[in-house]
Image (cartoon, rainbow, N blue to C red):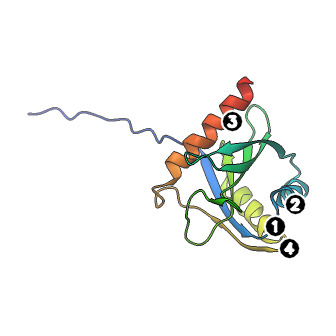
Amino acid sequence: MVKKKKKIVVEPFDDIKIIGICTHLEDYKLAWHINKLLNINLVKYSDIVNEDGLGFSFYLYDGGENCNTFNLVEIVNSEGRWVNFSPATDYLIVIRNFINDENLAKILEKIKSIENVQLAYLIDLDMNSKIDTLLEDIEMHEMELVKG
């Protein structure tokens, strides 16, 4: 009889939720609305540069230990598009650490309520193959900022 081996499967980006936003708002205006509605303080840092050398706006709010960390990342600007999503998406909000479904739904509704936000939706991490590379780039950029 052959013994079965047990495998532990670890998701590379555990406890991450991503909200896609379609809007014509400038990054600083969107960040201001999000800060006001969610009672957080997204702060603009140096642009995140993709593999093509294009710079995209990057905002960070770290709630501290055992709290959520939020990134607001621009993925479309006048220079080009970093990643194509369907439906069309201009910004991503990356929420790290556990957040229950009720609080996530409240955040999503608040973002949808912002004037000039045409669409806000939860991105399915399993259905989007481009997201892992994008999340790695975001995490590396944040680590460089923390080190510096």
Classify residue 76 as left or right of residue 65.
left
Q: Amino acid at mark 3?
A: Glu
Q: Amino acid at mark 4?
A: Glu
Disc 1 is placed on an element classified as: loop
Marks 3 and 2, the one that precedes in the sequence: 2
Marks 3 and 4, the one that precedes in the sequence: 4
Disc 4 is placed on an element classified as: loop
Which residue is painted at 64% across and 66% down in the image? 89
Q: CA distance from mark 1 to mark 3?
A: 24 Å
Q: Quadrant of the C terminus?
A: top right
Disc 3 is placed on an element classified as: helix
Disc 2 is placed on an element classified as: helix
Which residue is painted at 39% across and 39% down in the image? 9
Check contact, mark 3 vs mark 2: CB within 8 A.
Answer: no
Q: CA distance from mark 3 to mark 4?
A: 29 Å
Q: CA distance from mark 4 to mark 1?
A: 9 Å
Q: CA distance from mark 2 to mark 1?
A: 6 Å
Q: Position of residue 137 (x, y in %)?
A: 58, 42
Q: CA distance from mark 2 to mark 4?
A: 11 Å
Give the residue at mark 4: 115
Q: CA distance from mark 3 to mark 2?
A: 22 Å
Q: Assess disc 4: are there few (<14), some (14-19) or many (≥20) residues with their C-alpha within 10 Å of its C-alpha.
A: few
Numbered label attached to residue 25? 1
Check contact, mark 3 vs mark 4: CB within 8 A.
Answer: no
Give the residue at mark 3: 142
